Amino acid sequence: MASGHRAQWKGFLKFGEVSCGVALYTAASTSERVTFNSINKVTGNRVNRVFIDSETEERVEREDQTKGFEIENGQFIIIDPEEVAATILESNKTLDVQAFIPSSEVDDIYFDKPYYLTPEMGAEAFAALRDGMRKSKVAAIARAVLFRRMRTVLIRPQGNGLVATTLNYDYEVRSSRKAFEEMPKLNIEGEMLALAKHIIGTKRGEFDPASFEDRYEAALAELVKAKIEGKALPKRKSVEVSKPSVLLAALRESAGLMKTASHKPKRTAANANAGTGRQRAARGAAEKAASSKAVPQRKAS
């Protein structure tokens, strides 16, 4: 992995009687987001977070904190992290492949966090698994103790390595039936359905993550820039929900406006590494403005 990136976990990947040393690296990071500090409105100073004993109201340092399970109101049993680790008999250093499944079999609603999986020792075994999975068009289901918890991981080939995505357990995923049970039963047909299909057809494209702009981050950067320069703050644009009485007219209008969209070249899929290291233009503008103004030595908030 490129220098500057620290492995989140190191251990072994085992499939059958074959194993190799591997490392997990975070595949997605929020480090480039605009961040804020909590500020005291009265003094303008940063506010620090401290932990206070609920009874004595005295400050509790990090080294004096542990975990506890509430057995009844206000009564806890102390659970030490080492005791938690000891309850899991399986090694916390091995990603043990349980099965190989079709790549499309896992519903992505179960996806939790993605990690890049790279070889540390035994690169030949790692490459054999990677290429074998790619040729067979399968993914691997593995289990391991990661970050002090037993986790199920979906492993798939990606470029020269593998991507390991931690999965939510079934009990953690909320029922879609319950989520949509109050959804009114509507049967859309005729011209309304035809227009909806036409609009979808004119907007067809291909997945290109490099083309997706984080407008919220850009808006935050512009807000910071406006505050620094003393300019008027941007106003929120209102969005009106299409009412049933005018929905058909809105669909007709949309279909007419979008006819030219079908003549635009299709976007092409981008490699997962295409956006690495890019600085956002809006954030750069805000930082440039901040450096050119005489402002206090604290982050804007």
Image: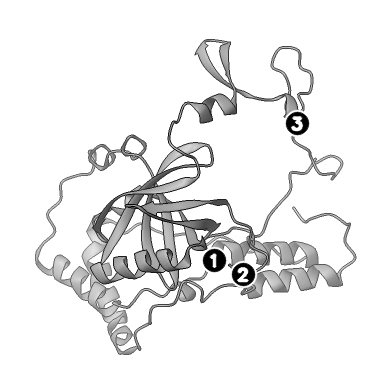
For label 2, the crowd category at 10 Å Cα-Cα, with few meaning under 14, some 14 to 19 and many 20 or more, is few
**33 over 266 or under it: above or below:** above
Compare marks 2 and 1 and give the one earlier in the sequence.
2
Q: Looking at the picture, how far across and down is residue 64, in whole percent?
A: 73, 24
Instruction: Please state which of residues 70 and 233 is positioned toward the viewer in this rendering.
Output: 70
Q: Looking at the picture, how far across and down is residue 226, in whole percent?
A: 73, 66
| Outermost residue to the front | 17
Picture residue at 21% right of the left edge, 66% below the top:
248
Q: Amino acid at mark 3?
A: Val
The residue carrying mark 3 is 50
Q: Looking at the picture, how far across and down is residue 51, in whole percent?
A: 72, 27
The residue carrying mark 1 is 215
- Looking at the rendered structure, the number of numbered marks drawn on it comes to 3
The residue carrying mark 2 is 2
**128 over 243 or under it: above or below:** below
Kindly identify which numbered label has been placed on residue 143: none
Picture residue at 84% right of the left edge, 70% below the top:
291
Compare marks 3 and 1 and give the one earlier in the sequence.
3
Q: Is residue 145 left or right of residue 182?
A: right
User: For numbered disc 1, what is the local secondary structure?
Assistant: helix
Q: Amino acid at mark 2?
A: Ala
Q: Looking at the picture, how far across and down is residue 273, in whole percent?
A: 51, 73
**Is mark 3 in CB contact (under 8 Å) with mark 2?**
no
Q: Quadrant of residue 206?
A: bottom left
For label 3, the crowd category at 10 Å Cα-Cα, with few meaning under 14, some 14 to 19 and many 20 or more, is few
Q: Is residue 30 left or right of residue 208?
A: right
Picture residue at 56% right of the left edge, 60% below the top:
236
Cα–Cα gap, marks 3 and 2: 36 Å
Cα–Cα gap, marks 2 and 1: 28 Å
Picture residue at 25% right of the left edge, 60% below the top:
104
Cα–Cα gap, marks 3 and 1: 33 Å
Compare marks 3 and 2 and give the one earlier in the sequence.
2
